[in-house]
Amino acid sequence: VGDNSSKLRTVLLQALQRSSFIILSGGLGPTKDDLTKKVVAEALEKKMVIHKPTLASLKKRYEKRGIALSKNNYSMAMCPPDAQVLPNPLGAAPGLIIPHKEKQIILLPGVPSELKAIVEDELIPYLLKQKEKNYVIKKQVLKVWGLPESAVGEQLEDLMEENQNPKVGLRAKIEGIEISIVARAGTPLTAEQLIETTESEIRKRLGDDIYGTGDTTMEKVVGMLLSIKKKTVAIAESLTGGLISSLITNIPGSSNYFKEARITYSNESKVALLEIPEELIKKHGAVSKEVGEEMAKNIRRIAGTDIGLSATGIAGPGGGDSKKPVGLVFVGISTEEEVKVEKYQFMGTRAMAKKRTALATLDMLRRYLIAR
Amino acid sequence: VGDNSSKLRTVLLQALQRSSFIILSGGLGPTKDDLTKKVVAEALEKKMVIHKPTLASLKKRYEKRGIALSKNNYSMAMCPPDAQVLPNPLGAAPGLIIPHKEKQIILLPGVPSELKAIVEDELIPYLLKQKEKNYVIKKQVLKVWGLPESAVGEQLEDLMEENQNPKVGLRAKIEGIEISIVARAGTPLTAEQLIETTESEIRKRLGDDIYGTGDTTMEKVVGMLLSIKKKTVAIAESLTGGLISSLITNIPGSSNYFKEARITYSNESKVALLEIPEELIKKHGAVSKEVGEEMAKNIRRIAGTDIGLSATGIAGPGGGDSKKPVGLVFVGISTEEEVKVEKYQFMGTRAMAKKRTALATLDMLRRYLIAR
């Protein structure tokens, strides 16, 4: 629905005729095109009052940033007197639950990060309390790196027949293949047992190709392993341009195991920052197994860490030729035991090549750490 | 709709009763839970045949990656004989347009990057040809960095009244505030003129706070400016952990202006890699105006570039105290003319602090470049 009062009103009245819970997102901000609260209040014939705790937290928020609260900002603290306010941990405008007869109208901010935070922290717990069900649904997600979707599908074919319980599904993402296991049962315990049986069967078949569960990420798994094994890491990045380091440092506490990275985007900086011999680059090219090895070895030595990682390749769209096409990538790892480089041929855009290279590098680190 | 044949069939038949164009996304992959094509063909009573050009391109794709085409992969080349195939530039499964009486069922892959590419390259041009309309809608988006949403709203208040043409709306994103201008008119030219008048009024009020239009990004704008002004850049990153460099290197051809980055996540690496005097860190702390200045100055000198950028701060959730709270950030720029550091206090999660810091740093570079 666009920022249009009459369309918004029509949709709201329509939804009220058929649903018990109506969720609207967006239009709670401080500006003129933020109409949602006003339209809902008018449609339900409710007046609006200042919600004092919200106003106080708005004031505090703006003070901290050194900005005065403008009159427009006051609108974010207005709500019907019988509304329940859902605090917004990441932004200014809170969510609202407005009761209307047997129904509830739920207003959430449109900024995706804020919406997500309120849904997870406030709305889901609230909704779970609303309705007693006579069955439960439980879901587990397994994340796979290193196999194409079709290969995973073939290995799990017998588990993926329709109308099985649990239901097994696959989804291809840049971050790898996601296997979902959804069980429906009379009690949480039974549902969990159903999932457990299927999960352990899948784990038996796919082994270490499964890198995590649920909403974990490769960088979380790697961070946990580095912490447990007390290893430090430094990174030499070329085509990924800082993405591997940025992923690793997304994890709170990563400064305990991540020491430094050198982003060497030119041949000269590879020579100056990573001490790669010029002749080696001349002989094999910057995108080669040999240079990848040297990058991993040298960053480990120079930074004095337990592990050195490297990535060099052609992200595209330019820079490729028939011998070294766009998407050709070498990722490397250097440890006290060995230096290893793997070759990949990725497809897709520049951003996809960067992301897949970063994940392949982290996955190499993951497999090294779990083997130790 | 879950991966469930009967639910999928019900939804499809329902949609056929009320819409002329029905778009389904997902379920076109090679595995057992990919049901969409099969269910649609059965519901429309169409047989499925091999689409030879698709099969050929699948074979080529898999050969390039050195994988044999499995029997499951053949399903991705099947379609009803009267379907129009929409090639997938980023993945294996193509989209399809299946005619049915006066209606059209459009199948798209579920992987977001692939769906987006097919919609933009194939589906929108196709749909535009389908229907002659007696009016046109044109949209322009202006992107703003450096002002809160409420400040933009106050400056544009008179342009944002409801039922105006063009319609002006705001949206707050991590990447700044987006102003949309939507015009409706009898001809494309009139719509464009309407937009132009409003756009130039907004530009007069907001000036350089507008960093770009449409689907441009801060890193694209900065890359273009660096290319035009023939300036090179090197980056010293602390809390952003490589994110600034990764954004800059998302742009094809960035190797012409981006030379290197040093990700110094520890005090020791700041001393070793950026030659920051130990006493300076001891006296002011690593998160300080003084260290930010020194980082920008030193990376410029060491890398021999025209411009040096720096970012140091506390990403959180740990590491803050009452004097230096989580979200405190210093971003710096060093050029032949000056060294400048700006202080920010960001709110929100670790990932948001990293992203906002990276954008603030790039915006500082942008403002420097446009002033020259």
Image (tube, coloured by chain):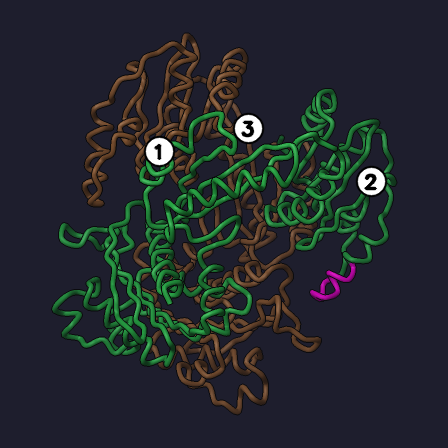
Chain colours: A brown, B green
- Secondary structure type for disc 1: helix
Q: Residues within 10 Å of mark 3 (few under 14, many from 20)?
A: some
Give the CA distance from mark 1 to mark 3: 24 Å
Residue at 44 percent across and 78 percent down: it is A337
Q: Quadrant of residue A63?
A: top left
Residue A177 spot, x, y in % from top left: 59, 50
The residue identified by callout 1 is A121
The residue identified by callout 2 is B83
- Secondary structure type for disc 2: loop
The amino acid type found where label 3 is placed reads Arg
User: Which numbered circle lies on residue A184?
Assistant: 3
Nearer to us of marks 2 and 3 is 2
Subunit bearing disc 3: A
The amino acid type found where label 1 is placed reads Asp
Camera sees residue A349: yes
Nearer to us of marks 1 and 3 is 1
Q: Is residue B62 magenta?
A: yes
Start-end of magenta stretch: B59-67
